[in-house]
Amino acid sequence: MKVLKGLALGLLSFLLFLSLAVFGLALTINQTVLNPDFVVSGVNKLDMSSLAEEFLSEQIPLDGEQELVAGVLNDTIADLEPWIKEQASAVIYVGYDYLLGESQSLNLVISTEQLKETLRDNLKSAFKQSLPPEFAGLPQDMIDAEFDKYYQEFAEQIPPTFDLGENITPEVMTALEQARQIINYIQIAYQTLIALILVLITGIILIHRQVRGATRQLGITFLTYGVPGFASIFILKNYAMAQLTQLMTQPGFPASLQAWLPQLVDDFLAPLEMFSLGILIGGVALLVASFVYKPRETSL
């Protein structure tokens, strides 16, 4: 009987260890890749204006008229950065609502009115600062009329709204459907792992039928995962940072990403780090409790 009990406890402890290891990875995915709040937070931390300025400086030769165009675009992106992040957040939430099964369609219409207004103001300012020779000496109202004519032709190229659903091709829609199914399986597995961990812990407690033995075995099992798990996160984080440092020293790497990428890696690993640390602390507490706990003496 003791042999069967030992085998059962050993099997349950091994399954619990494996379940904790898999659940740590599932938790990380659920709290990062499958969490729209995490993605939105990452987007909001990105300095879009600096990134756009670096990109435009490489793509547009900074001489004459091209320099003027680059300046207008830089100013427009800087002015619109809060608006861009707001619209990006809206797109992310709508996309995740669909991928997570909370919505059956991708319905999002973005108005370009604010984009046009900001672009118009920056174009007008640049136009006044570098008037063409033929406009020199003309009254201000005539200059404004000429600019309005030019801008009207330019603004007609920008649609009044952008419909997210209408711009998705059938191929992209098929890929989204497949991703939606995979995410559904991941969520089912995530919930199943939680239930399995609780069942395994309950099984160990019921087989022991006494506090000291159950807390000691659970504590050892938790520590078996928690110690190497937490240590591996520390090693993985240092390795990732070393690789990022090497990547960021490459010529042409955007300077605006040098602070953003390490923070993104740190945020991505944070759920697994906290889970491993929590299991480690829980294991220590259970192990200490198994030595401190004194069973009640039964009276004859």
Image (spheres, rainbow, N blue to C red):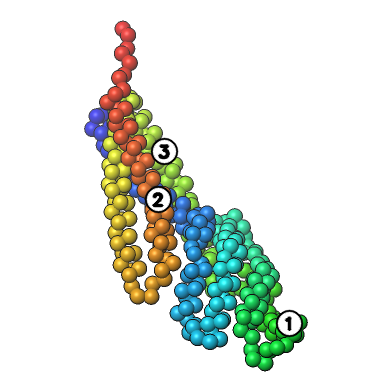
Q: Which residue is mark 2?
A: 270
Does dot 1 land on a helix, a strand or a loop?
helix
Q: Amino acid at mark 3?
A: Leu
Q: Amino acid at mark 2?
A: Ala
Q: Between tags 3 and 1, which lies in front?
A: 1
Quick check: marks 3 and 1 in contact, CB under 8 Å? no
Q: In x, y percent, where is residue 10?
A: 27, 38
Above or below residue 39? Residue 160 is below
Identified at 29% across, 39% down, the residue is 223
Above or below residue 267? Residue 198 is above
Quadrant housing residue 194: top left
Does dot 3 land on a helix, a strand or a loop?
helix
Identified at 61% across, 58% down, the residue is 103
As drawn, which residue projects farthest toward the left? 3
In the image, which disc is placed on residue 198?
3
Q: In x, y percent, where is residue 170?
A: 57, 73
Q: Earlier in the sequence, mark 3 or mark 1?
A: 1
223 left or right of 262 in image = left
Q: Find the distance from the CA under tag 3 to the CA under tag 1.
A: 77 Å
Q: In x, y percent, where is residue 57?
A: 47, 78
Identified at 31% across, 13% down, the residue is 297
Quick check: marks 1 and 2 in contact, CB under 8 Å? no
Which of 118/177 is in front? 118
Location of the C terminus (image quadrant): top left
Q: Find the distance from the CA under tag 1 to the CA under tag 2.
A: 58 Å
Q: Answer few, some or many: residues within 10 Å of disc 1's Cα (few below 14, many 20 plus, some between 14 and 19).
A: few
Q: Which residue is mark 1?
A: 140
